[in-house]
Amino acid sequence: MEMLVTKFSNGKYRNESDLFAEPISADNVKLMGEMIALQLFRTRKKHYCEIADKLYIGLIKDLHHMGEIDYIVSEGYDYAQTAICFLWQYKGKRVNDVCYINKDGREINIKLACYRETGRALDHYRRKTMRAEPTAFDDYKALPADPVNRFEEERTDYGKAERLMDAMRLTEAEKETLNCYMNGMRQSEAALALGITIFGVKYRKLRIRQKYNMYVGGC
C-alpha cells in the first residue's frame, strides 16, 4: 500500500522519515504540517472517538481535493495550518533540533513541540464541543458505529472542571495532564500523549494533588 506521504509528495518521499530528515523549507513545510496533524488525529482517535475521526477523515479528503476549484477545506485542515505555522518559525532547521528545554531539563525538539502545540488546539476544541448541547457529532456516520457512544453516556461538566483548574492555579502542563485523566487515559497513555516519561506524569499528578489540597481541599 502506498504511504500517504509518498502519495501527496508525488513519490518524492518513500516515508515520513525521508520527509522529516530534511531541513524545514518552503518546499516541505506544508507536507510536514499535514503529516503531523494526521499523526495527532490517529493518536487521539482512541480517546476522542467521533471528534478525531471526523477531523482525520476531513483532512484526508482535503489532501485529495484541495487543489480543485471551489473546494472548501474541512475543520481538520485548521490543525495542519497550526502545525505549518509553528514549523515555519524554524525555517532552515531540522525537526529534531532542540526547540526548548522544559522545566525538568529535558530537551524538546521542534517536531514534538509542534505536536504539542497542535494538540493543545485540539484539546481546546474538544472541550468546547463537549460543552455544546446537543453535540455536533450525534449524527456522524463516516465510520462504522462505535458500540459505545461516549458522547451520550458521559455528561461531564467541563465548565465546572475548568473553573476548578483555575482555582487550583495549575500550569498549562498540569492542565494537560489532568485533561488526560479526565479523558480516561491510563498513566502510560498519558505519558505517550504528552511526550513525557511516566515519572513525569507521576510528578505532575503529585503537584496537582498538592495544589488541590492547598487551594480547594480546605474550602
Image (cartoon, helix red, strand yellow):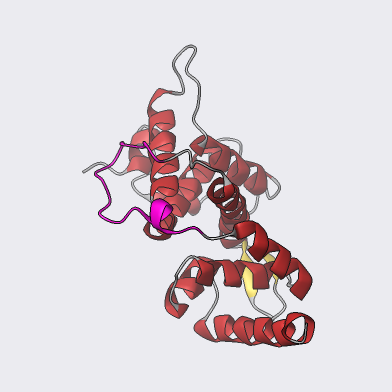
Task: Between residue 164 and residue 102, name the one nearer to us.
Answer: 164
Above or below residue 132? Residue 185 is below
Q: Residue 64: x, y in percent?
A: 38, 28
Q: Residue 142: x, y in percent?
A: 31, 36
Prevailing secondary structure class for the magenta stretch in the rendered image: loop
Task: State the residue at coordinates (45%, 71%).
Answer: 185
Task: State the residue at coordinates (70%, 69%).
Answer: 164
Region rendered in magenta: 138-155
Q: Is residue 111 visible?
A: yes
Task: State the residue at coordinates (65%, 68%).
Answer: 175
> In which quadrant of the rendered view does residue 200 lie?
bottom right
Task: State the residue at coordinates (74%, 80%).
Answer: 216
> In which quadrant of the rendered view does residue 133 lie?
top right
Locate residue 78 relative to residue 1 in the image: left or right: right
Q: Residue 180: x, y in percent?
A: 52, 68
In the image, farthest residue toward the left: 1
Above or below residue 125? Residue 94 is below
